[in-house]
Image (spheres, rainbow, N blue to C red):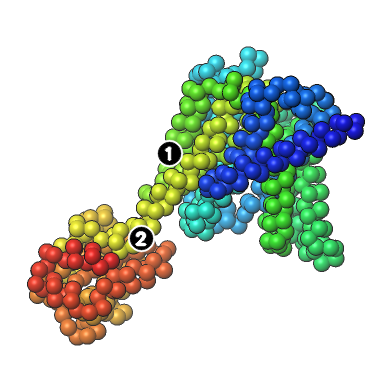
Amino acid sequence: MSSSESVLFLLILGLMLLLARGLGELFRYFKQPMVIGEILAGILLGPTVFGMLAPDIYNHLFNSSAAISSALSGLAMLGVVLLLIVSGLEVDLGVLIRQSKVAGLTSFTGIIFTFIAGFALSYLFPSFLGLPPEKSPLIFSLFIGTSLSITALPVVAKILMDLKLFKSEIGFTVIAAAMLNDITGWIIFSILITQISDSGHGFSPQTTVGLMFAFLLVTLVFGRKFFNRILPAIQKKFSFPGSVLNFIFIVGLAGAAFTEYIGIHAIFGAFIVGIAIGDSAHLKEETREIIQQFVTNIFAPLFFVSIGLKVNFFLNFDFFLTLTLVVVATAAKVTGSALGARAAGMGKLESKAVGFGMNAHGAMEIILGLLALEYGLITERTFVALVIMAIITSVISGPLMSVYAGKIKKLRTLKGLLTPSSIYITTASSKEEIIRELCTKAAAAYRLDEIALRVAVFAREETSSTGLVNGLALPHARITAKEPLLMCAVSKTGIDFDSLDGKPSHIFFLLITPQSMPELQLQLLSEIAKPFSDDELAVRVRENPAGFYPLISSRI
């Protein structure tokens, strides 16, 4: 570059970072992913807004110098490679293994549903989806199906942390399934690239795919063990954290260079190396944080801003195409992922929360779209629709997940479990009779195995009586269930339940909780016992058994 070009280049970088940071912080304030603001910064700086309002200044800044254009492209390339290294570091193979059943089913059904929907839509209506004339309809349809299948791991992780669900069963499932989605999606896309790219230094597509799987095997098996052994030595013998940061970037860039050399995009190699290094128990959290802050605040914004510089979003916006992609991607992804989670044993509400969590396409979708645009596989119109679809699905995932998370939280409280239909007046006269009666009604109401339920409750009762004080008895058990269940009986005459205060019990709560949630049983038992600090409720029940529900509802 000449001196004037260097000045212009530095000013452009400063302007890109300023707008990206400002708009990113604005979106973060409204609890939305910062990446949306960074993309919007590029749209404002690019041909969509700035190029239309001040075309001469825009062309002078971005189109007057081939050297500046090349430098910006190089920085964008570096940004996306480093971003994929960071994304790989976030993949926890331990979580994948522990959640293999539910995550595998969730990921598989989510991918299958969206892949089939995207493939069918683009194969049946190629012109509507924007198939370039010279490209293969099959490859194009495979790409659309793959792109709709991707879940953005960084966006999902941020949403779960904001909703305080990251370490919940829902959070582990979504994260593990998103990891599998990303790995599967990049493998499929990498194979597609071999069919449309002239790169690969003379390798045939079959050889390229073989080398890719060899790279996967070597990096995730042998490389992972090597990194786990060498990291402690680097941290001990060299300066920290600089030496570790250098090592991670050097190895990550080497992996990126290798996959680019064999004909697969560099980001795939960066992602796989990131997974292998991130799995090491010796990689300190401080190091992860430094890398993430450095990349996500400097290089990643430059990449996302550059997206807006690529095309005119206004001229290439197709409302019906965008709406179609949003509806198809959301319906297929949510339905497929929710069905997979449900089949793996999750509850109905939890499965829906997982489905909406998996629907966030975010950065990964945009990166795929940009690469496809660069390879000429899609048109600018399709690219704009994919970017907007990725933004919309990322924006709606958090609020919709929070709706179902709120319902789940409410369902796991006494107030959520206790309904008028779960309370009845009993005429039972003995402890055994009331327990059998409660089990019969609970089994019928919740479609449970009555014999198994009765055995579990009586087994718990044999260890110690659940008759408490002030007219309350709390028979309970933990069984193989997806959600807690509650049935309540009230007796005007009272039943001898071996209570702690030696008095007859008048209110009987049968509490059934999942075996996997021992802490939930203690929480609910405490909630039920709290309103019975005196015997007022028992007295009122003797006077008016039918009035128990409004009375207890006012106290919880």
Write down the residue under mark 1: 335
Tell me which residue sits at (34%, 62%) in the image. Answer: 413
Tell me which residue sits at (82%, 67%) in the image. Answer: 236
Could you tell me residue 453's position as x and y percent? Answer: 28, 64
- Quadrant assignment for the C terminus: bottom left
Most extreme residue toward the top is: 133
Write down the residue under mark 2: 412
Could you tell me residue 274's position as x and y percent? Answer: 71, 49
Q: Is residue 180 above or below residue 73?
A: below
Could you tell me residue 9's position as x and y percent? Answer: 81, 34
Q: CA distance from mark 2 to mark 1?
A: 24 Å
Q: Residue 286 — which label?
A: none
Most extreme residue toward the right is: 2
Residue 458 shows in the view: no
For marks 2 and 1 on the same chain, the one whose residue lies earlier in the sequence? 1
Front in this rendered view, residue 217 or 84? 84
Label 1 secondary element: helix
Residue 222 is left or right of residue 456, and the answer is right
